[in-house]
Image: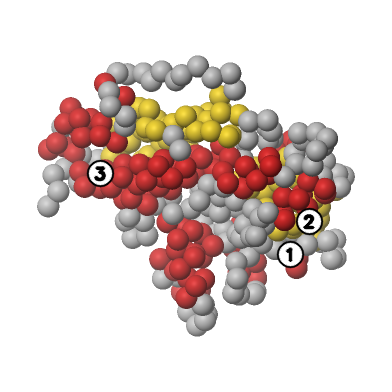
Amino acid sequence: MSISLAELGEAELLRRLARFAPPGQLSDDTAALPPDQRPLLVNTDVLVENIHFSDATTSAGDVGWRAVAANLSDLAASGAVGIDGITVALVAPGTTPWNWVEGVYEGIGEALQRFGGVLLGGDCSGGEQRLLSITALGRLGPLRLHRNGARPNDMLVTSGPHGLSRLGLALLQNDQRLNGVALKQQLRDAAIQAHQRPMPRLDAFQRLLESRPEGLPWRAGGTDSSDGLMAALQGLCTSSRCGANLDRCALPVAQHWPSGDLWTRWCLAGGEDFELVISLPSSWAERWLQCMPEGRCIGTITEEPSMIRWSDNGEPVDAEGFSHYSQI
């Protein structure tokens, strides 16, 4: 049986965690970043036990990976072209096994090795509930994506399918709503992978930069779909004082995705998809989609403030995004 954090003690815990950072990085209370003329992008996300993860659905390594992925997804959706690193704040009861903490930091390390950046520092504390908060730092490239950058007649595009993470959670929880539903094994595997090991779309943003038509201004509206596709669209439309028409037949779903109200709702509002949702001039959007096999044009931006409608009948789209205070 693994030693607990209470038995380990704070000094020994910090000594063990030091191996996940560059040599000497955790020996001081601050981290110094090298000089860089590019603006610094900073964001923080928190994962709370029984809200964002549980032992029943998420291994310790997956918790660490997901925490990094959530932060880096926000950086990608803001225009980051390089990742400096992250700081980690961990809260856990004293009864928490060291093996769980070790697994979390191994997952963090795997994600950083995959996407870039290092562990810069952090803090640890006891508490009644496990909580992991990460602050990520990245460097801005030539395009600063803002939610307020959408304009009427833009094409609405996204980098990949939506709803997979929500389906993965349902599968891991043996959700009774899936009883009798024949799901392809390929879809099951992709859904569980999307939930446990999501991919921040730094690659899709890089392709966005590379596909800009010559002479076109560096202007785009963008966000990620960590809270769901509808929440992303609502954020774009509200901030840009525009609306949107969605193409019902072009919803971004995975291959073999079933049809029906539940499946449409999970696509629109399942949450934790971590895809880019971008508003672009049509010439730029078309070039980006040519190099994005899973990308999809899902509609257009309209002049009607904050209204998101179906393009076929003009009816409002009725679906809310993921809420940290409720379940879909």
Name which residue lies at 18% across and 39% down.
5
Q: Position of residue 131 (x, y in %)?
A: 36, 41
Alpha-carbon neighbours of circle 2 within 10 Å: few (<14), some, or many (≥20)?
many
Up the image or down, 39 lies above or below 119; here it is: above
Question: Where does label 3 land, which residue?
Answer: 102
- Which residue appears at 70% of the width and 38% of the height? 147
* Pointer 1 residue: 250
Q: CA distance from mark 1 to mark 3?
A: 43 Å
Residue at image position (44%, 34%) is 117
Q: Earlier in the sequence, mark 2 or mark 1?
A: 1
Local SS, label 1: helix
The disc at residue 299 is 2
Asked whether disc 2 touches disc 3, contact meaning CB atoms under 8 Å apart, the reply is no
Q: Against 19, is 254 above or below?
A: below
Seen in the image, is 90 located left or right of residue 212?
A: left
Compare marks 1 and 3 and give the one earlier in the sequence. 3
The amino acid pointed to by label 1 is Ala
Q: Foreground residue, 26 or 101?
A: 26
Quadrant of residue 36 within the rendered picture? top right
* Amino acid at dot 2: Gly
Residue located at (50% from left, 72% from top): 186
SS under mark 3: helix
Q: Amino acid at mark 3?
A: Glu
Are the residues flagged by discs 2 and 1 in contact, CB closer than 8 Å?
yes
